[in-house]
Image (cartoon, rainbow, N blue to C red):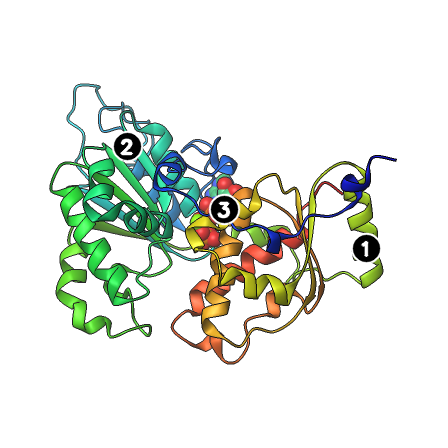
Amino acid sequence: MSHTAQHTAARLVDRHPAISGAELVATLVPPRQFDGASFDSYRPDEAYPSQAEARDTLRLFAEPEAPIARGGFFGLGRKKPAAEPRPNTVNKPGVYLDGGFGVGKTHLLAATWHATAGRKYFGTFIEYTALVGALGYAGALGVLQGARLICIDEFELDDPGDTMLMTRLIGDLTSTGSRIVATSNTPPNALGEGRFAASDFMREIQAMADRFVTIRIDGVDYRQRDLDGDALSLSEDAYLFTLADVVASGDRMTDDSFDELISHLATVHPSSYIGMLDGVRVIGLRDVHELVDQSAALRFVAFIDRVYDAQIPIRATGLPLTSVFGGGMLDGGYRKKYLRCMSRLNALTQAEGAA
Ligand SMILES: Nc1ncnc2c1ncn2[C@@H]1O[C@H](COP(=O)(O)OP(=O)(O)OP(=O)(O)O)[C@@H](O)[C@H]1O
Ligand SMILES: [Mg+2]
Protein backbone atom coordinates (compact mmCIF):
# COMPACT_ATOMS: atom_id res chain seq x y z
CA MET A 1 0.00 0.00 0.00
CA SER A 2 1.11 3.54 -0.51
CA HIS A 3 0.04 4.69 2.94
CA THR A 4 3.21 4.04 4.89
CA ALA A 5 3.73 7.73 5.70
CA GLN A 6 0.27 7.90 7.14
CA HIS A 7 1.15 5.21 9.68
CA THR A 8 4.35 6.86 10.84
CA ALA A 9 3.96 9.34 13.66
CA ALA A 10 5.82 12.62 13.27
CA ARG A 11 8.48 13.58 15.78
CA LEU A 12 8.77 17.00 17.38
CA VAL A 13 12.55 16.63 17.54
CA ASP A 14 12.68 16.62 13.72
CA ARG A 15 11.30 20.14 13.62
CA HIS A 16 13.70 23.10 13.68
CA PRO A 17 11.58 26.18 13.11
CA ALA A 18 13.04 29.68 13.16
CA ILE A 19 10.38 32.33 12.99
CA SER A 20 11.21 35.61 11.24
CA GLY A 21 10.41 39.09 12.53
CA ALA A 22 7.65 39.50 9.93
CA GLU A 23 6.07 36.19 10.96
CA LEU A 24 6.26 37.24 14.61
CA VAL A 25 4.38 40.44 13.87
CA ALA A 26 1.69 38.40 12.09
CA THR A 27 1.20 36.26 15.23
CA LEU A 28 0.54 39.29 17.47
CA VAL A 29 -3.18 38.47 17.83
CA PRO A 30 -4.97 36.51 20.58
CA PRO A 31 -4.69 32.68 20.43
CA ARG A 32 -7.62 31.08 18.59
CA GLN A 33 -8.98 29.63 21.81
CA PHE A 34 -9.86 33.22 22.83
CA ASP A 35 -11.59 34.22 19.57
CA GLY A 36 -14.90 34.26 21.39
CA ALA A 37 -13.65 35.79 24.63
CA SER A 38 -15.68 38.87 25.53
CA PHE A 39 -16.63 40.78 28.66
CA ASP A 40 -20.09 39.25 28.36
CA SER A 41 -18.79 35.67 28.17
CA TYR A 42 -16.67 36.23 31.29
CA ARG A 43 -18.52 34.83 34.33
CA PRO A 44 -17.20 36.52 37.44
CA ASP A 45 -17.18 34.36 40.55
CA GLU A 46 -19.33 36.14 43.13
CA ALA A 47 -17.12 34.83 45.90
CA TYR A 48 -14.30 36.98 44.47
CA PRO A 49 -15.54 40.55 43.82
CA SER A 50 -12.17 41.44 42.27
CA GLN A 51 -13.23 39.49 39.17
CA ALA A 52 -16.25 41.65 38.35
CA GLU A 53 -14.23 44.72 39.26
CA ALA A 54 -11.43 43.79 36.85
CA ARG A 55 -13.96 43.15 34.09
CA ASP A 56 -15.71 46.48 34.60
CA THR A 57 -12.49 48.47 34.78
CA LEU A 58 -11.22 46.89 31.57
CA ARG A 59 -14.53 47.41 29.85
CA LEU A 60 -14.27 51.13 30.58
CA PHE A 61 -10.64 51.14 29.53
CA ALA A 62 -11.50 49.47 26.20
CA GLU A 63 -14.64 51.42 25.38
CA PRO A 64 -14.42 54.77 27.15
CA GLU A 65 -17.38 56.10 25.13
CA ALA A 66 -19.76 53.17 25.58
CA PRO A 67 -22.93 53.65 27.66
CA ILE A 68 -22.76 52.55 31.27
CA ALA A 69 -24.55 49.27 31.91
CA ARG A 70 -27.33 49.36 34.45
CA GLY A 71 -26.43 47.92 37.82
CA GLY A 72 -22.80 47.59 36.81
CA PHE A 73 -19.61 48.33 38.61
CA PHE A 74 -20.94 51.56 40.06
CA GLY A 75 -23.74 49.34 41.22
CA LEU A 76 -26.43 51.87 42.10
CA GLY A 77 -28.96 49.56 40.47
CA ARG A 78 -30.83 52.37 38.73
CA LYS A 79 -30.47 53.88 35.32
CA LYS A 80 -28.24 56.90 35.00
CA PRO A 81 -29.08 59.66 32.56
CA ALA A 82 -27.06 59.10 29.39
CA ALA A 83 -25.60 62.61 29.46
CA GLU A 84 -23.89 62.16 32.80
CA PRO A 85 -20.10 62.13 32.42
CA ARG A 86 -18.48 58.77 32.92
CA PRO A 87 -16.33 58.31 35.97
CA ASN A 88 -12.75 58.08 34.88
CA THR A 89 -11.52 54.98 36.66
CA VAL A 90 -8.28 54.55 34.78
CA ASN A 91 -6.21 57.70 34.74
CA LYS A 92 -3.04 55.96 33.60
CA PRO A 93 -2.05 54.62 30.20
CA GLY A 94 -1.95 51.04 31.41
CA VAL A 95 -3.78 48.39 33.37
CA TYR A 96 -1.83 45.56 34.99
CA LEU A 97 -3.80 42.46 35.96
CA ASP A 98 -2.06 40.50 38.65
CA GLY A 99 -3.61 37.19 39.62
CA GLY A 100 -3.44 33.46 40.17
CA PHE A 101 -3.63 30.72 37.59
CA GLY A 102 -6.68 30.15 35.47
CA VAL A 103 -8.73 33.02 36.91
CA GLY A 104 -9.41 34.36 33.42
CA LYS A 105 -6.67 36.96 32.97
CA THR A 106 -5.99 36.02 29.36
CA HIS A 107 -9.73 35.86 28.72
CA LEU A 108 -10.12 39.45 29.95
CA LEU A 109 -7.04 40.54 28.01
CA ALA A 110 -8.49 39.09 24.81
CA ALA A 111 -11.88 40.66 25.60
CA THR A 112 -10.17 44.06 25.90
CA TRP A 113 -8.43 43.47 22.58
CA HIS A 114 -11.67 42.52 20.82
CA ALA A 115 -13.49 45.53 22.28
CA THR A 116 -10.85 48.02 21.13
CA ALA A 117 -10.98 49.60 17.69
CA GLY A 118 -7.86 50.62 15.79
CA ARG A 119 -4.39 49.16 15.39
CA LYS A 120 -3.68 46.74 18.22
CA TYR A 121 -1.33 43.92 19.16
CA PHE A 122 -1.65 40.94 21.46
CA GLY A 123 1.27 38.78 22.48
CA THR A 124 3.00 37.08 25.32
CA PHE A 125 5.91 38.78 27.01
CA ILE A 126 8.21 36.27 25.33
CA GLU A 127 6.87 37.18 21.89
CA TYR A 128 7.61 40.88 22.45
CA THR A 129 11.16 40.17 23.62
CA ALA A 130 11.60 37.89 20.59
CA LEU A 131 10.34 40.68 18.35
CA VAL A 132 13.05 42.95 19.69
CA GLY A 133 15.55 40.11 19.23
CA ALA A 134 14.51 39.72 15.59
CA LEU A 135 14.04 43.37 14.55
CA GLY A 136 16.26 45.23 17.02
CA TYR A 137 14.90 47.77 19.49
CA ALA A 138 14.24 50.51 16.92
CA GLY A 139 12.69 48.04 14.50
CA ALA A 140 10.32 46.61 17.10
CA LEU A 141 9.40 50.07 18.36
CA GLY A 142 8.74 51.11 14.76
CA VAL A 143 6.22 48.28 14.38
CA LEU A 144 4.43 48.82 17.69
CA GLN A 145 4.50 52.61 18.01
CA GLY A 146 1.25 54.42 17.33
CA ALA A 147 -0.88 51.37 18.12
CA ARG A 148 -3.97 52.16 20.12
CA LEU A 149 -3.65 49.08 22.31
CA ILE A 150 -0.85 46.69 23.18
CA CYS A 151 -1.74 43.59 25.17
CA ILE A 152 1.10 41.79 26.95
CA ASP A 153 0.21 38.40 28.41
CA GLU A 154 2.34 36.66 31.04
CA PHE A 155 4.50 39.62 31.99
CA GLU A 156 7.59 38.43 33.88
CA LEU A 157 11.06 39.81 34.33
CA ASP A 158 13.50 36.91 34.24
CA ASP A 159 16.82 38.73 33.91
CA PRO A 160 18.43 42.19 33.72
CA GLY A 161 18.30 42.17 29.89
CA ASP A 162 14.52 41.68 29.82
CA THR A 163 14.12 44.30 32.49
CA MET A 164 16.01 47.04 30.70
CA LEU A 165 14.32 46.19 27.44
CA MET A 166 10.71 46.03 28.59
CA THR A 167 10.82 48.97 30.96
CA ARG A 168 12.21 51.09 28.13
CA LEU A 169 9.74 49.78 25.57
CA ILE A 170 6.76 50.43 27.82
CA GLY A 171 8.03 53.94 28.56
CA ASP A 172 8.46 54.71 24.86
CA LEU A 173 5.08 53.25 23.89
CA THR A 174 3.02 54.90 26.62
CA SER A 175 4.66 58.28 26.12
CA THR A 176 3.61 58.21 22.46
CA GLY A 177 -0.03 57.49 23.22
CA SER A 178 -0.38 53.71 23.19
CA ARG A 179 -2.40 52.07 25.93
CA ILE A 180 -1.15 48.86 27.48
CA VAL A 181 -2.83 46.01 29.29
CA ALA A 182 -0.57 43.43 30.88
CA THR A 183 -1.25 40.25 32.84
CA SER A 184 1.05 38.52 35.24
CA ASN A 185 1.24 36.16 38.18
CA THR A 186 3.39 38.74 39.98
CA PRO A 187 2.57 42.28 41.14
CA PRO A 188 4.72 44.89 39.36
CA ASN A 189 6.78 45.87 42.39
CA ALA A 190 7.76 42.22 43.01
CA LEU A 191 8.82 41.49 39.43
CA GLY A 192 12.15 39.71 39.22
CA GLU A 193 12.21 38.87 42.92
CA GLY A 194 14.21 35.73 43.67
CA ARG A 195 15.40 35.53 40.06
CA PHE A 196 18.12 38.14 39.71
CA ALA A 197 19.30 41.22 41.58
CA ALA A 198 16.04 42.98 40.84
CA SER A 199 16.78 45.60 43.50
CA ASP A 200 19.47 46.99 41.17
CA PHE A 201 16.67 47.83 38.76
CA MET A 202 14.23 49.31 41.24
CA ARG A 203 14.27 52.69 39.52
CA GLU A 204 13.35 51.24 36.11
CA ILE A 205 10.80 48.83 37.52
CA GLN A 206 9.18 51.54 39.64
CA ALA A 207 8.99 53.97 36.72
CA MET A 208 7.29 51.28 34.68
CA ALA A 209 4.93 50.27 37.48
CA ASP A 210 3.84 53.93 37.77
CA ARG A 211 2.37 53.75 34.25
CA PHE A 212 -0.12 51.10 35.33
CA VAL A 213 -3.20 50.88 37.46
CA THR A 214 -2.75 47.49 39.10
CA ILE A 215 -5.74 45.23 39.65
CA ARG A 216 -5.33 42.07 41.67
CA ILE A 217 -7.70 39.25 40.62
CA ASP A 218 -8.31 36.44 43.08
CA GLY A 219 -10.15 33.24 42.45
CA VAL A 220 -9.98 29.52 41.90
CA ASP A 221 -8.36 28.00 38.85
CA TYR A 222 -11.14 27.78 36.26
CA ARG A 223 -9.37 24.91 34.51
CA GLN A 224 -9.29 22.75 37.63
CA ARG A 225 -12.98 23.02 38.40
CA ASP A 226 -13.66 19.71 36.62
CA LEU A 227 -10.24 18.08 36.84
CA ASP A 228 -8.46 15.71 39.17
CA GLY A 229 -5.23 16.73 40.81
CA ASP A 230 -2.69 14.72 38.82
CA ALA A 231 -2.01 14.84 35.12
CA LEU A 232 -3.04 11.61 33.41
CA SER A 233 -0.31 9.11 32.72
CA LEU A 234 -1.02 6.22 30.35
CA SER A 235 0.29 2.68 30.43
CA GLU A 236 2.59 1.76 27.54
CA ASP A 237 -0.24 -0.25 25.97
CA ALA A 238 -2.81 2.50 26.26
CA TYR A 239 -0.32 4.95 24.77
CA LEU A 240 0.43 2.72 21.77
CA PHE A 241 -3.26 2.11 21.27
CA THR A 242 -3.96 5.86 21.21
CA LEU A 243 -1.08 6.46 18.84
CA ALA A 244 -2.28 3.80 16.40
CA ASP A 245 -5.82 5.08 16.64
CA VAL A 246 -4.99 8.73 15.98
CA VAL A 247 -2.58 7.97 13.17
CA ALA A 248 -5.04 5.56 11.51
CA SER A 249 -7.71 8.24 11.63
CA GLY A 250 -5.43 10.42 9.52
CA ASP A 251 -4.75 12.98 12.27
CA ARG A 252 -1.23 13.93 13.18
CA MET A 253 0.02 12.74 16.55
CA THR A 254 3.65 13.30 17.38
CA ASP A 255 5.61 10.63 19.26
CA ASP A 256 8.75 11.62 21.17
CA SER A 257 10.76 10.51 24.13
CA PHE A 258 10.44 13.14 26.85
CA ASP A 259 14.19 13.23 27.28
CA GLU A 260 14.85 13.89 23.60
CA LEU A 261 12.23 16.62 23.51
CA ILE A 262 13.82 18.35 26.50
CA SER A 263 17.25 18.30 24.79
CA HIS A 264 15.72 19.49 21.53
CA LEU A 265 14.06 22.50 23.16
CA ALA A 266 17.52 23.87 23.95
CA THR A 267 18.27 24.07 20.21
CA VAL A 268 15.18 26.11 19.18
CA HIS A 269 14.49 29.69 20.28
CA PRO A 270 11.45 29.75 22.61
CA SER A 271 9.74 32.30 20.37
CA SER A 272 9.86 29.67 17.60
CA TYR A 273 8.39 26.82 19.64
CA ILE A 274 5.04 27.65 18.14
CA GLY A 275 6.44 26.57 14.76
CA MET A 276 7.01 23.04 16.11
CA LEU A 277 3.27 22.63 16.54
CA ASP A 278 2.11 23.26 12.97
CA GLY A 279 -0.53 20.72 12.02
CA VAL A 280 -0.14 18.71 15.25
CA ARG A 281 -3.44 17.40 16.67
CA VAL A 282 -2.13 15.33 19.60
CA ILE A 283 1.27 15.30 21.31
CA GLY A 284 2.67 11.99 22.58
CA LEU A 285 5.49 11.95 25.13
CA ARG A 286 7.09 8.73 26.33
CA ASP A 287 8.85 8.09 29.60
CA VAL A 288 8.27 11.40 31.31
CA HIS A 289 10.68 11.90 34.21
CA GLU A 290 11.56 14.52 36.77
CA LEU A 291 13.46 17.61 35.63
CA VAL A 292 16.16 18.92 37.92
CA ASP A 293 17.81 21.49 35.65
CA GLN A 294 16.17 24.89 36.01
CA SER A 295 16.92 26.09 32.46
CA ALA A 296 15.53 22.89 30.96
CA ALA A 297 12.45 23.22 33.14
CA LEU A 298 11.87 26.84 32.07
CA ARG A 299 12.19 25.91 28.40
CA PHE A 300 9.66 23.16 28.93
CA VAL A 301 7.32 25.70 30.56
CA ALA A 302 7.66 28.01 27.54
CA PHE A 303 6.92 25.06 25.23
CA ILE A 304 3.84 24.03 27.20
CA ASP A 305 2.58 27.61 27.09
CA ARG A 306 2.49 27.36 23.30
CA VAL A 307 0.87 23.91 23.42
CA TYR A 308 -1.75 25.34 25.76
CA ASP A 309 -2.39 28.32 23.48
CA ALA A 310 -2.91 25.91 20.60
CA GLN A 311 -5.05 23.63 22.82
CA ILE A 312 -3.29 20.45 21.69
CA PRO A 313 -4.02 17.50 24.01
CA ILE A 314 -1.05 15.56 25.42
CA ARG A 315 -0.85 11.80 25.94
CA ALA A 316 2.09 10.65 28.03
CA THR A 317 3.67 7.69 29.78
CA GLY A 318 5.90 7.68 32.84
CA LEU A 319 5.74 10.18 35.67
CA PRO A 320 2.54 12.29 35.67
CA LEU A 321 3.45 15.56 33.97
CA THR A 322 2.28 17.51 37.00
CA SER A 323 5.22 16.00 38.93
CA VAL A 324 8.11 16.88 36.62
CA PHE A 325 9.32 19.97 38.47
CA GLY A 326 11.66 18.47 41.03
CA GLY A 327 14.86 19.33 42.84
CA GLY A 328 13.33 22.04 45.02
CA MET A 329 12.34 24.07 41.98
CA LEU A 330 8.85 24.54 43.33
CA ASP A 331 10.29 26.49 46.24
CA GLY A 332 12.39 28.87 44.16
CA GLY A 333 11.76 32.19 42.41
CA TYR A 334 9.89 30.55 39.55
CA ARG A 335 7.39 28.74 41.77
CA LYS A 336 4.33 30.42 40.29
CA LYS A 337 5.51 29.77 36.77
CA TYR A 338 5.77 26.05 37.52
CA LEU A 339 2.44 25.92 39.30
CA ARG A 340 0.73 27.58 36.38
CA CYS A 341 2.39 25.12 34.02
CA MET A 342 1.19 22.22 36.17
CA SER A 343 -2.36 23.56 35.96
CA ARG A 344 -2.03 23.70 32.18
CA LEU A 345 -0.44 20.24 31.92
CA ASN A 346 -3.22 18.78 33.99
CA ALA A 347 -5.83 20.29 31.69
CA LEU A 348 -4.00 19.19 28.52
CA THR A 349 -3.57 15.55 29.54
CA GLN A 350 -7.25 15.36 30.43
CA ALA A 351 -8.48 17.26 27.37
CA GLU A 352 -10.56 15.39 24.83
CA GLY A 353 -8.44 14.90 21.76
CA ALA A 354 -8.68 13.50 18.30
CA ALA A 355 -8.83 10.06 19.97
N1 LIG B 1 -14.73 33.84 34.83
C1 LIG B 1 -14.65 33.15 33.69
N2 LIG B 1 -15.72 33.10 32.87
C2 LIG B 1 -15.66 32.40 31.72
N3 LIG B 1 -14.56 31.73 31.29
C3 LIG B 1 -13.48 31.76 32.07
C4 LIG B 1 -13.46 32.48 33.30
N4 LIG B 1 -12.24 32.34 33.86
C5 LIG B 1 -11.54 31.56 33.03
N5 LIG B 1 -12.29 31.20 31.95
C6 LIG B 1 -11.87 30.32 30.87
O1 LIG B 1 -11.00 29.35 31.47
C7 LIG B 1 -9.85 29.16 30.69
C8 LIG B 1 -8.62 29.61 31.50
O2 LIG B 1 -8.69 31.02 31.67
P1 LIG B 1 -7.47 31.97 31.27
O3 LIG B 1 -6.55 31.26 30.35
O4 LIG B 1 -8.02 33.26 30.80
O5 LIG B 1 -6.82 32.11 32.71
P2 LIG B 1 -5.47 32.84 33.11
O6 LIG B 1 -5.76 33.62 34.35
O7 LIG B 1 -4.94 33.59 31.96
O8 LIG B 1 -4.56 31.61 33.47
P3 LIG B 1 -2.94 31.50 33.42
O9 LIG B 1 -2.45 31.96 34.74
O10 LIG B 1 -2.72 30.05 33.20
O11 LIG B 1 -2.45 32.32 32.30
C9 LIG B 1 -10.06 29.96 29.42
O12 LIG B 1 -10.62 29.10 28.46
C10 LIG B 1 -11.06 31.04 29.82
O13 LIG B 1 -11.85 31.45 28.72
MG1 LIG C 1 -3.18 33.43 30.87
Q: Position of residue 277 (x, y in %)?
A: 57, 45
User: Which element carries disc 3, helix, strand or loop?
Assistant: helix
Q: Amino acid at mark 2?
A: Ala
Q: Which quarter of the figure is the C terminus placed in?
A: top right
Q: N-terminal of the two: label 3 or label 1?
A: 1
Residue labelled with disc 2: 62
Q: Is mark 1 within 8 Å of ligand 1?
A: no
The amino acid sitting under disc 1 is: Leu
Above or below for 68 versus 175: above
Residue type, label 3: Ile
Q: Residue at x 38, y 56 (%)?
A: 99
SS for dot 1: helix
Numbered badge on residue 240: 1
Relative side of 213 to 312, left or right: left
- Residue drawn at (38%, 73%) of the image: 333
Please name whichever residue, 291 or 36, is drawn nearer the observer in this view of the structure. 291
Task: Decide: is 337 above or below 9.
Answer: below
> Residue drawn at (53%, 51%), measured in percent from left and top?
16
Mark 3, residue position: 274
Asked whether residue 81 appears in the rendered view, the answer is yes
Do callouts 3 and 1 mark residues in contact (Cβ within 8 Å)? no
